[in-house]
């Protein structure tokens, strides 16, 4: 199957999402219990078809539809509880490697200080 097929299928995922959202009243657009089914269905559809067609997920096209859903339906919603995302890979790598690199230094410092303490005694 071609890239064109994936593009057409993702459009169908979007169209189905819009169809499901037609019954959601404006006052309910920020209520997760109301919008979770259509939103989850959009994500499931995009992910499932990406997998079936051997595309990576998330991908640029799928993300475009997710952003489009937020822009069109959820742009006025504010989060009561902030959503935390993983930091970028380079920051995450630095946060992992820094403590690991400190361990030999701290071990050396402890050994050196304990030898220094014995010499004074």
Image (cartoon, helix red, strand yellow):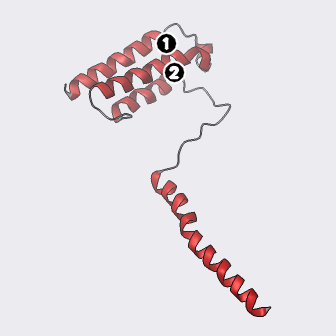
Q: Nearer the viewer, residue 79 or 99?
A: 99
Q: Is residue 99 above or below residue 107?
A: above
SS of the residue under disc 1: helix
Instruction: Using a 10 Å C-alpha cutoff, classify the residue at mark 1 as few (fewer than 14 neighbours), some (14 to 19) or many (20 or more).
Output: some
Q: Residue at image x 60%, y 20%?
A: 32
Residue 52 lies left or right of residue 117; in this view the side is left
On residue 53, which mark appears?
none
Q: Residue at image x 49%, y 21%?
A: 40
Q: Nearer the viewer, residue 42 or 73?
A: 42
- Dot in front, 2 or 1: 1
Question: Residues at badges 2 and 1 in contact (C-beta under 8 Å)?
Answer: yes
Q: Residue at image x 68%, y 31%?
A: 80
Q: CA distance from mark 2 to mark 1?
A: 9 Å
Where does the C terminus fall, quadrant-wise? bottom right
Image spot of residue 1 (x, y percent): 19, 25
Q: Dot 1 corresponds to which residue?
A: 21
Q: Dot 2 corresponds to which residue?
A: 73
């Amino acid at each position: 199957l071609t890239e064109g097929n994936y593009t057409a299928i993702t459009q169908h995922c979007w169209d189905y999402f819009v169809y499901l959202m037609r019954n959601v009243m404006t006052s309910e657009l920020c209520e997760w219990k109301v919008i979770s089914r259509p939103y989850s269905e959009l994500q499931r559809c995009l992910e499932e078809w990406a997998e079936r067609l051997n595309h990576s997920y998330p991908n640029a096209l799928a993300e475009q539809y997710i952003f489009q859903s937020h822009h069109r339906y959820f742009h006025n919603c504010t989060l009561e509880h902030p959503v935390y995302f993983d930091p970028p890979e380079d920051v995450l790598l630095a946060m992992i490697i820094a403590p690991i690199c400190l361990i030999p230094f701290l071990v050396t410092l402890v050994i050196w200080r304990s030898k220094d303490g014995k010499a004074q005694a």
